[in-house]
Image: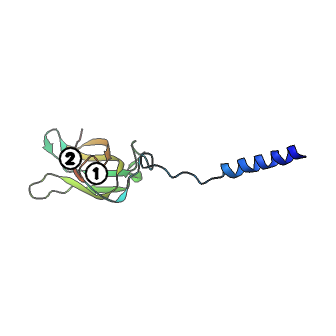
Amino acid sequence: MIFKSILFYFVLAMFILSCGKDKEPTPNNQNAIAGGTGGSNHLVVFTRRDKAQMASRVWLKYAAKLKPADTSFYNEVYATMTEPGYGPHAHFNGLKLGFYYLHAEGTYNGNLLLADSTIEISSKVPSSWDITLTLK
């Protein structure tokens, strides 16, 4: 009878100890590819063909390292604009740290030109970041 009591309390203690609160994720692995709006980072995407600046449309997918199946899965899309002194570009503002997938499309002489890139916004890059996509 004593053996059964000891066994019962041992099993009960193991059960209670195993039901502890899950550990909070550490900053190093929390949302490893997180991204999205609500941050303080700004991305400016310039588009060009060869060495010439080129107007296009630019898509941005949050928390992605791989190209989505089609453009309907992207989170933001903008047509490039030209401001005095700057070539065609699109602004993506208020981004969180994380990974993003960029896609751009433009036409030249009736041909569709494309560019794709994966980027990571981390604490190691400036909060306002310019990149250039070359359409091919």
Helix, strand or loop at disc 1?
strand
Measured from the top left, where is residue 104 in percent x and y?
A: 28, 47
> Can you tell which quarter of the image residue 50 is in?
top left
Tell me: 8 left or right of 116: right
Q: Residue tagged by mark 1? A: 58
Q: Are marks 1 and 2 in contact (CB under 8 Å)?
A: yes
- In percent of the image, x 78 and y 49: which residue is there? 9
Disc 1: CA contacts within 10 A as few (<14), some (14-19) or many (>=20): many
From this viewpoint, which residue is outermost toward the left?
A: 85
Measured from the top left, where is residue 18 in percent x and y?
A: 66, 48
Tell me: 45 left or right of 76: left
Measured from the top left, where is residue 17 in percent x and y?
A: 67, 50
Question: For residue 47, which numbered disc appears in the image?
Answer: 2
- Given the image, on which type of amino acid does mark 2 rest? Thr
- In percent of the image, x 17 and y 52: which residue is there? 88
Q: Nearer the viewer, residue 98 or 11?
A: 11
- Given the image, on which type of amino acid does mark 1 rest? Val
From this viewpoint, which residue is outermost toward the right?
A: 1
Pointer 1 or 2: first along the chain: 2
Q: How is the image coloured?
A: rainbow
